Amino acid sequence: EVLERNRVKISTIFSYSRETLFDHSLRDILPLLREKGVGLLNAAPTGMGLLVPQGPPDWHPASDAIKAACHKAAQYCKAREVDIARLALRTAIENEELPTTFISAAKVEFIKQNIEAATTPLSDKEKECRGHIVAEFLKPLQDANNTHWEGVELRQYWEEVGKTLLLQSHYGR
């Protein structure tokens, strides 16, 4: 929509958490981006921490349903000694239509794990585990069109602004 209405030439889009084990919505716009000559930078294949063994930070804006599904998937992987973050990263890297995927890491140890994940294909055990968690825990999110939290923070911001303006107009503060 923005590409169609915008008068400014957009050369690159930075998208996060839209090519993950639970959300593939970025794939829907790839043909349009190619047609318009727009580059794409993919980021956060772990969904900003949803698909890591320790789970997301407390402030994560995803819905409880997304958090719960990702937690179940992480627990399934953990029980099978499979690193869910590795599965998430490989999913993005294996998509040849995405030339660039950004990742971040809070610790040097995680950077090393990410390099290994990026350079080592999944084992058959990991592929089986990925297939199971997607089918069992994550695909239901896609089916319910509940895979992202876009606009949640903005909506919360405007609710707070509205409350503040209401108090100011009512009490003159």
Image (spheres, rainbow, N blue to C red):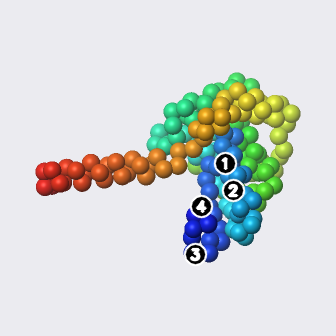
Could you tell me the amino acid type at mark 1? Answer: Ser
Give the CA separation, mark 4 to mark 3.
Answer: 13 Å
Instruction: In the rendered structure, find residue 29 and report the number of the disc placed on it.
Output: 2
Query: What is the crowding at mark 4: few (fewer than 14 residues within 10 Å), some, or many (at least 20)?
Result: few
Nearest to N terminus: mark 4 or mark 1: 4
Left or right: 1 with respect to 155? right
Q: Position of residue 76 (x, y in %)?
A: 69, 26
Residue drawn at (86%, 33%) of the image: 124
Front residue of this view, candidates 67 and 124: 67
- Lower sequence index among marks 2 and 4: 4
- Residue type beneath disc 3: Val
- Residue at the spot x=70%, y=27% of the render? 136
How far apart, in angstroms, are the residues tagged by discs 2 and 3? 19 Å
Q: Nearer the viewer, mark 4 or mark 1?
A: 4
Q: Is residue 59 above or below residue 14?
A: above
**Residue nearer the viewer, 95 or 123:** 95
**Residue 53 location (% of width, % of height):** 63, 35
Decide: marks 3, 1 in contact (CB < 8 A)?
Answer: no
Q: Which amino acid type is marked by label 2?
A: Ile
4 vs 3, front mark: 4
Q: Which mark is residue 8?
A: 3
**SS at mark 4 in the image:** loop
Residue 104 in view here = no
Say which amino acid is labelled 4: Glu
Give the crowd class for mark 2: few <14, some 14-19, many >=20 residues within 10 Å.
few
Q: Secondary structure at mark 3?
A: loop
Instruction: Check if mark 1's residue and mark 2's residue have beta carbons within 8 Å.
Output: yes
Label 1 Cα crowd, 10 Å radius (few <14 / some 14-19 / many 20+):
some
Location of mark 4 (residue): 1
- Residue 25's tag is 1
- Corner quadrant of residue 32: bottom right
